Amino acid sequence: MDYTHEPHGLFFMIDNKSFYASVESVERGLNPLESIIVVMSEADNTGSGLVLATSPMAKKLFGISNVSRQYEVPHDPRIIVVPPRMNLYIQKNLAINKIFREYVADADLFPYSIDESILDMTKSWRLFGRTPEEVARKIQLRIRHELGLYTTVGIGENPVQAKLALDLQAKHDHELIGRLTYESFPRHIWPITELTKVWSIGRRTAAHLQRLGIHSMGELAHVNPYELQQTMGLIGAQLFALAWGIDRSHFTQVRPPKEKSWSNSQVLPRDYRVQSEIELVLREIGLQTTARMRHHQQQTSCISLYVGFAWDGQADDGRSGLHHSRRIDPTDNAQTIIRELVTLFRENWDGQPVRNLGVGLSRLSPSGRLQLDLFQDPQRQIKDDKFDRVIDDLRDRFGKTAVIPASSLLKGGTMLRRAALVGGHNGGNSFD
Amino acid sequence: MGGIVLIDETKEADLILSRLVPLFTAQWHCRYRLDVVNNQYGHVFNFFLDIQRQNHRERSIPLHSVRTTDLAVLERVINQVRQGTALTLNFVDFGHVRWPVSQRWIR
């Protein structure tokens, strides 16, 4: 393989070791690598409780993994269980990224998730050390000293190498640093046979590859890329590039998605069987999604509804849920959208118990002006439009729960309780 | 953080106690303890309620963070908290120092 025309940069992919659990350890004066801490969400829809994060020691001693359930965690007095504080983790993430900004220009820092960031160090690394490893060490120590957190660094000549170096090497390295180059890539990556360990290869892709007789990254690198693309489509070509550590993406030229849409969904705290209760939550989600869309001065002409059945309520034909879309006249009026959603729901729902609900709004266009309907009272339409905007303003100024539909107080409503959550989990105490 | 922030010790103590009350249910075979952590990284003092039922997992629930590094402020907050609860206080990461006013060891 000739790599001379591939991009040769220097990328750091930095993540926090067990981020939530580490933050909670530091807050309690414990060492994040030695404490046995489990961050457990007890939001309504997590059943008895869901493990969001575990400290490295809890993983090692008790084999507790993320998304374990409350009852899977042993009753051992050595384990400390703490509630999540999402707002605190967001603050810490901002503090970490602020430190990163001292090592790269703002334009070269790309936050990837709540605890991972990509740093394009190509232009700046020589300012901070003689080798990339030395620079990585420096950044790690800064974060350890200032925030008490341990970070893991993957180094690569392009983003994908940095990501694989992070996932496959750094996490097992004593210094928590891993490095891949075009030259060392085959040596380190090709022997891997557990394909799902590799970023971007999921269970189903791995199974597909197995069926094609590909059992290791080395084998993936040596198939005919054109044949692979023929059987797997574009993903085939991508996987082939992955096996050779090639990544031609330029973060500065981010492509906007072809068609944007707004959607919200939630897992219900229990199985909902009563139609009025399901429709209540559906209204709440419809309201929330419409409000988000209106904030961006857009209107929709296609609504979609997703209903996920409870585990034991699957339809006779084995369906686990339903998904329907409908074209409507362009609107950003919540009442109209909700009416359509409820109609769609009534037409398709057959009485199955429901556990998931989702609403999507697509085929967006700029709203700006109101398109009056010839067949309805124009005064009424203008009034409806104004009403929505006043509600939006009230919520912007006084918070999401400043005005709520009275129906949200009925049994089954989830809006009030969810309003206090961040990303579906407890945000932490206020006034902190 | 940053700049001078005046801290109303009564308010801080009240907040801590008001969060403590619904959590302290006084069960049998259960140890309750207030952890006060000197968090050097955040330049704050963190308060937690620690609950340990016999042979169960320990639970640690955040109550409040007092945004200061001034021990005198903390001492006043602690004095007021002590008036509202008889729970044991456990001081973490304070080292071997005395309270500025009472001159007793912090422990």
Image (spheres, helix red, strand yellow):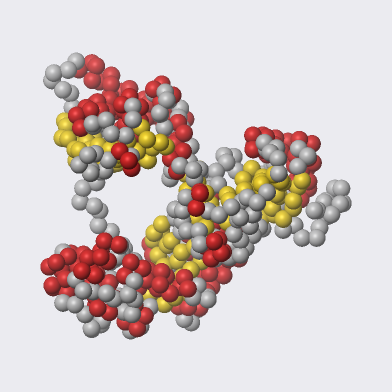
Q: Position of residue A232 (x, y in %)?
A: 17, 65
Q: How many marks?
A: 0
Q: Is residue A208 left or right of residue A169?
A: left
Q: Position of residue B93 (x, y in %)?
A: 72, 58
Is residue B103 something that shows in the picture? yes
Which residue occupies the foreground of this view, B9 or A62? A62
Residue A393 image point, x, y percent: 39, 29
Q: Examine the rendered structure and indicate whether residue A269 appears above or below residue A11.
A: above
Residue A234 quadrant: bottom left
Asked whether A215 or A281 is in front, the reply is A215
**The N terminus of chain A: image quadrant:** bottom left
Q: Is residue A127 visible?
A: no
In percent of the image, x 25 and y 57: which residue is there? Answer: A255
Q: Quadrant of the C terminus of chain A?
A: top right
The structure residue drawn at horizontal position 74% and vertical position 53%, both measured from the top left corner, is B91
Q: Nearer the viewer, residue A302 or A356?
A: A356
Residue drawn at x 24%, y 52% as measured from the top left? A257
Task: Left or right? Give the position of A344 relative to B46.
Answer: left
Q: Residue at x 27, y 72 (%)?
A: A242
Q: Is residue A414 left or right of residue A216?
A: right
Q: Which quarter of the figure has residue A58?
A: bottom right
Viewed as shown, does residue B101 lie left or right of A324? right
Q: Camera-side residue: A46 or A415? A: A46
x and y percentages locating residue A344 in the rendered image: 21, 31
